[in-house]
Image: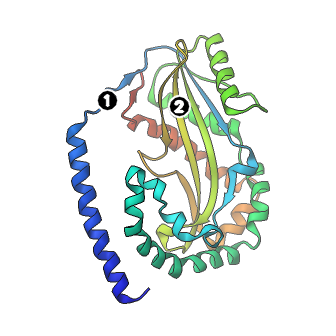
Amino acid sequence: MNTTKCATAMSNLRVLSAFLCALSLLTGCATTRPGRYFLRPGAIGVAVISAPTADLATVKRFADDGLVGGLIAPLALGPLGVFVWPFVAPITTVVGVTRGTTCDQRLDAAYPNLPEKYVEIVQREFSLADAQDQFAVALRKLTAAPIVEVAAPHGVDDAVRQQQLLATAAQRALGHLFLVKIVSIRLEPDLDNHCDSWKVSINMGIELWNVTDRKLMHHGPLGYGKFGAPFVKGQWSELELVLDEPGALHARLMPVFDAAGTSLIYESSFLLPP
């Protein structure tokens, strides 16, 4: 991309930013914030489920599907994505050309053939039971209500597993159930640090169920605040040691789940009993 095209793209992006800011102000004024849902006193369940390990453990290589798509996708921009993408695409193309290859080369140099080995590493280092324990510990810091761990059944799809968990929670007289879904444990070059280091991002979602009514009261991403997946990060020089030493990655992952559970105190959609 030549200098003239870059300048045009930057100009378009400034115009777009101004338009989106004005639109957000208008829509913000036209809507009201929903009220918070208060959990009534009583025992609260917590269960953690995940995708199969083969789908859970992913290595992000920017050359495989394009750094541009990894940075910004039209669908991620919401209803305006189709209109926004033509303005943004030239900028992300520049970034992709200059960074993509370098990021992949650093990953390959730090740990050759990692995509072929990573599923086995995550299977060894990640434990649903341990993650659930960490969430329970975090919730006990936030409320005096009893926190009860509910083991998730294996070998069934999410919909069946969800109903079985709610049935178990009802049998144990739990008023509410937090269901944490771990979507991916993804290792990637850290773009925020110009690919000078690596990080393992843990993408999670959370559902809050009223067990008595079997009603979903809240659902959304779970992380540090509203946006961004919790992560473990480190220098390239230590990547091979962290991944190959049994227990090393596990020790770094567990505090992330505790911190993600603690971040529930900042969730504006519901309020835990004192």
Neighbor class of circle 2 (other Cα within 10 Å; few <14, some 14-19, many 20+) is some
Q: Position of residue 248 (x, y in %)?
A: 70, 56
Q: How many marks?
A: 2
The residue positioned 38% from the left and 23% from the top of the image is: 37
Left or right, 236 with reference to 220: right
Occupied quadrant, residue 85? bottom left
Q: Nearer the viewer, residue 207 or 146?
A: 207
Q: CA distance from mark 2 to mark 1?
A: 17 Å
Q: Earlier in the sequence, mark 2 or mark 1?
A: 1
The residue positioned 78% from the left and 50% from the top of the image is: 124
Q: Position of residue 234 (x, y in %)?
A: 58, 65
Left or right, 161 with reference to 201: right
- Amino acid tagged 2: Glu
Q: Nearer the viewer, residue 151 or 80?
A: 80
- Amino acid tagged 1: Pro
Left or right, 135 with reference to 78: right
Q: Position of residue 225 (x, y in %)?
A: 41, 45
**Location of mark 1 (residue):** 34
- Quarter of the image that includes the C terminus: top left
Q: Nearer the viewer, residue 55 or 224?
A: 55
**Location of mark 2 (residue):** 207
